[in-house]
Every structure is written in C-alpha cells, then in structure tokens.
Image: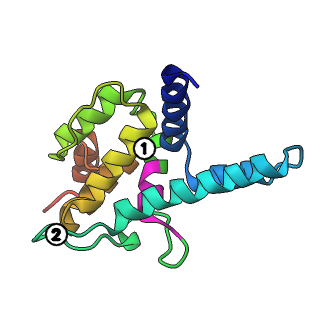
Amino acid sequence: MKNSNVHSILSELHRMLGNYIAEDFIHASQYGAITPHVREALRALAREAGRDSSRAVTKPMEKGHSRPSSASVPGSNNQSSNPLLAIVNMIRRSRRFGGTQSMLQFAKEMGLNVPARPKEGRERLAKRLAEAILLAPEPRRSDIVAQLAGNGDSQTQGWIDVIKNPRT
C-alpha cells in the first residue's frame, strides 16, 4: 500500500472521529443493510470516540480548578448526561458559530485559552472549546455556559430589567 493511501485513510478516520460522537457511530452500526464486519468497525469507532471524550472530561484538574459537574450545564441530568457532550451540542446548535473563527473569537472574549490550530475543523474545535469551558472555575464556567446558551446579560437585557424593575 502506498504511503499516501495510508495517510489518506488515517486522515479520514481522524476527521470522522472529530466530526461525530460515539452515539452517532452506534446509531450507524444499528442500520440493517450493513455487513457484520462494517457493524463491528462502527462499534470500534464508537468506542474510540467515547474514549476521547471521556479522557477530556476526566483529565486531572489544574490547581485551583474544581471538577466539572453536569449541574452547571443547562438541560442535563447528573446520571445520564455527559457535560462535555452537552456543551459541544450547544455549540453545534448555536447560530452564533458559523465557523471556526467565530468560536475562537468567543473563546477569546470569554478569556479561555483555545489557540488556533491549522486545518482544524469546526467539530474538533467545538470539542476543544467545550473542554476549555469545563476547565474554568465554577462561577466563571456558569457565566460562560449562560453566554453560550444566549442567556447572558446584554446591554439591551439590562435596560429591559431597569424598565421592568425600577428602583425607588
């Protein structure tokens, strides 16, 4: 096999692992019109994708940072939800992030250390951004998630609050 073919195959695998989560591979493996070998390959990819996201959530915390909890992620429950996946899904659904530059700008505005990487796709950057959010200390992490969800205080919202609740 030519080296270029090996690199192409590995590149495509890494792209798929960056674009899809474990559940996507599991759903694909349940499709009826695939061979048993392809089904097993999809399940192996699901295990690999799950391993990547679990490492991101369980990596050791730096001094002064608290362990992320799913209680800080809107719409998640503690037993069955992965906080990393919840935040990645929020980033995916947000109209705010049309591309990688908007994600990098958001990270910069929030004071997160998410450096740009050459040829990095939107999905992989979304995962890195979610990891950086989870590593933030708790009060700050909640603020960032609120901004991400679109619930952050804006100047307009501030004026609406003043009008609704005037101080006497």
Magenta range is: 81-88
Residue 72 percent across, percent down from the top left: 35, 68
Residue 96 percent across, percent down from the top left: 39, 33
Q: Quadrant of residue 109?
A: top left
| Residue drawn where x is 15% and y is 67% of the image | 62
Can you say which quadrant of the picture contains the N terminus?
top right
Q: Quadrant of residue 98?
A: top left
The answer to whether residue 151 is visible is no
Magenta stretch: includes residue 83: yes
Residue 114 percent across, percent down from the top left: 22, 42
| In the depicted structure, whether residue 111 falls above or below residue 68 | above
Q: Do the residues labelled 2 and 1 touch (CB within 8 Å)?
A: no
Residue ID for mark 2: 65
| Amino acid identity at mark 2 | His
The residue furthest bottom is 79
In the image shown, does 143 or 160 lie closer to the viewer? 143
